[in-house]
Image: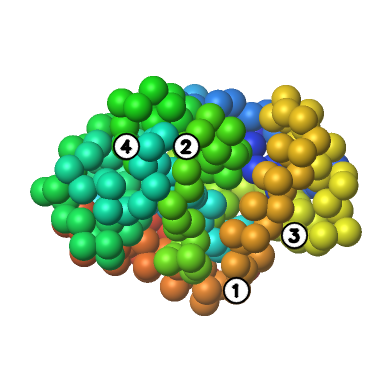
Amino acid sequence: MHLRTSVFALQTPLVAAAAEGFFADEGLEVSFESTTSSRAQMQQLTSGDVDVAQTAADNVIGLAAAGRGGARIVHVADLGIDQMVVARAGLGSWADVRGGRVAVDAADSGYAYVLYSLLEDQGISRAEYQLLPVGGPAPRFQQLCSGTADVGLLNPHLASRALAEGLSVIARAADSFPGYPNLVVATSAAAAVDRRAELAAYCRAVDRAVAWAHDPAHADRATELLMEARACGAEEARALYESERSLRSTPRPSAEDVRTGLELVAELRERMGGGRVPLSGYFAPVVGAA
């Protein structure tokens, strides 16, 4: 069975699930396809161009809130949002962001509401900065490096590269949102019903991979895998592995923790004016009791 998976970036568990044979043990052949933005990814998913998306929970919730409930979250493999608040060169604190330009994937999806909340916690309202909806992590990285944007969220891999370019990390989103779903598996609403067995096999493999990746005994092997998958050196790969591991508050969370985490995302969207939908409108678990 072949499953095409859309990703923004390959996290250690997905790399390990393929390289260590966890997918193969479930009778699966899995390929990974890069995406450029949350909207492009959701379009890929709902149109059937890919079978699975490793995505932000709010991307799926946002579709449902807009009345386009063509996608479902089928599994959450860990908690602890892997996003860093990165500021362009010359900016070193939250205070510098007031009156500046904030890079997001889209104004109403992805991790945008997380960033709005973090800014609000620092006393910076949405009227006090300009939004730059530029797409996924790579475009945000480029906007920050060029100085076009003043602040934005980046994953650990790009945050590490940003530091090398003279940018600064001013906060870790995980410190404010430790229970936020991280490795989220989503599919189309139709596939959540019609391909349930295949998806359950996929999620079991991902669960094994999360446990494997979180075990420090596998740090050296994980570093090797990331070097190959990310085409980077040993030092960068090891730092990425350690960063992912430190941000992961709960590997393989309970059904109750998953529900609580998803409700956190939905409540944040509602608080920030993005609408609200019930859990049943976007969550259709395929493994475990939830």
Residue at (32, 47) in percent of width and height: 112
Residue at (43, 27) in percent of width and height: 145
Q: Amino acid at mark 4?
A: Asp
Place of residue 264 in the rendered image (x, y in percent of width and height, measured from the top left): 37, 67
Place of residue 208 in the rendered image (x, y in percent of width and height, measured from the top left): 77, 56
Q: Residues within 10 Å of mark 1 (few under 14, many from 20)?
A: some
Q: CA distance from mark 4 to mark 1?
A: 38 Å
Q: Is residue 227 positioned above or below 185 on the image?
A: above
Q: Can the viewer see residue 189?
A: no
Q: Earlier in the sequence, mark 4 or mark 3?
A: 4
Mark 2 = which residue? 167
Q: Is residue 131 left or right of residue 193?
A: left
Q: Is residue 265 left or right of residue 1?
A: left
Q: Earlier in the sequence, mark 2 or mark 4?
A: 4
Q: Is residue 222 left or right of residue 257?
A: right
Mark 3 = which residue? 214
**Residue at the farthest left position:** 127
Mark identifier at residue 150: 4
Q: Residues within 10 Å of mark 4 (few under 14, many from 20)?
A: many
Mark identifier at residue 207: none
Which of labels 3 and 2 is toward the front?
A: 2
Q: Amino acid at mark 3?
A: His
Residue at (70, 46) in percent of width and height: 239
Q: Is residue 30 positioned above or below 70 on the image?
A: above
Place of residue 92 in the rendered image (x, y in percent of width and height, measured from the top left): 39, 47
Q: CA distance from mark 4 to mark 3?
A: 33 Å
Q: Secondary structure at mark 4?
A: loop
